[in-house]
């Protein structure tokens, strides 16, 4: 084997050890290299780590006062649909009665919507005009 042959064999061996040859497309230095690196998603650029997920927006469920819904019924709704104690439900009901509006709780959009529907459907079955609404936090 000539010296040149030995050198060729060494070069192949080195490639086989997995050293970066600069031609591995998976590493982003394949066909596209040198043309538009800024547009090549497979070139690894060190960025400050930033979580990809955003916290979901939260929504307040508001209860509105009216002149007809009985206080006991409002308290029952707050206990049943917002899992409040009798004391908390009474406090929130009186707040709404006096101020016109009050917060029943803060939830994801889907849960807030469901609570509003549950309260207003239940109120309608009893022919009370009780109204709830949602407001983005
Ligand atoms: N204002 C009602 C009454 O005097 C009671 C009430 C409280 C109604 C809160 C609705 O969200 C409400 N009977």
Image (cartoon, grey):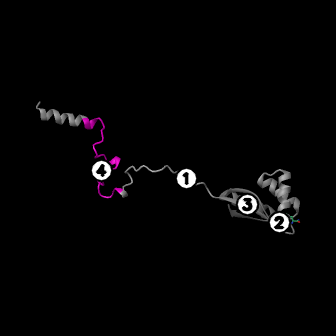
Return the x and y of residue 53 as percentages of the image width and height: 55, 53
Mark sitting earlier along the chain (3/1): 1
Q: Return the residue at label 1.
A: 53
Mark sitting earlier along the chain (2/1): 1
| Tag 1–tag 4 contact (CB < 8 Å) | no
Compare residues 64 and 79 and report the one nearer the observer: 64
Q: Return the residue at label 4.
A: 30
* Residue 17 magenta-highlighted: yes
Measure the C-alpha gap from mark 4 to mark 2: 68 Å
Q: Residue furthest left?
A: 2
Looking at the image, is mark 2 or mark 1 nearer the viewer? 2
Return the x and y of residue 33 as percentages of the image width and height: 30, 53
Q: Residues within 10 Å of mark 4 (few under 14, many from 20)?
A: few
What numbered label is drawn on residue 99? 2
What numbered label is drawn on residue 70? none
Q: Residues within 10 Å of mark 1 (few under 14, many from 20)?
A: few
Residue at 61% of width from left, 56% of height from top? 56
Quarter of the rendering occupied by the N terminus? top left
Measure the C-alpha gap from mark 2 to mark 1: 38 Å
Mark sitting earlier along the chain (4/3): 4
- The local secondary structure at tag 4 comes to loop
Q: Which residues are magenta?
A: 14-37
Measure the C-alpha gap from mark 4 to mark 3: 55 Å
- The local secondary structure at tag 1 comes to loop
Residue at 22% of width from left, 36% of height from top? 12
What numbered label is drawn on residue 61? 3
Quarter of the rendering occupied by the C terminus? bottom right
Measure the C-alpha gap from mark 3 to mark 1: 25 Å
Return the x and y of residue 46 as percentages of the image width and height: 42, 49
> Is residue 31 shown above or below 123?
above
């Amino acid at each position: 084997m000539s010296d040149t042959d030995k050198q060729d064999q060494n070069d192949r061996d080195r490639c086989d050890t997995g050293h970066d040859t600069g031609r591995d497309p998976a590493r982003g230095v394949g066909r596209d290299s040198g043309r538009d690196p800024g547009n090549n998603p497979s070139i690894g650029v060190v960025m400050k780590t930033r979580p990809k997920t955003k916290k979901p927006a939260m929504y307040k469920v508001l209860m509105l006062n009216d002149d007809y819904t009985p206080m006991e019924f409002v308290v029952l709704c707050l206990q049943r649909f917002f899992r409040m104690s009798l004391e908390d439900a009474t406090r929130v009901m009186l707040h709404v009665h006096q101020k016109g509006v009050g917060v029943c709780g803060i939830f994801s959009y889907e849960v807030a919507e469901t609570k509003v529907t549950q309260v207003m459907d239940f109120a309608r079955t009893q022919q009370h005009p009780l109204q709830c609404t949602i407001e983005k936090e």
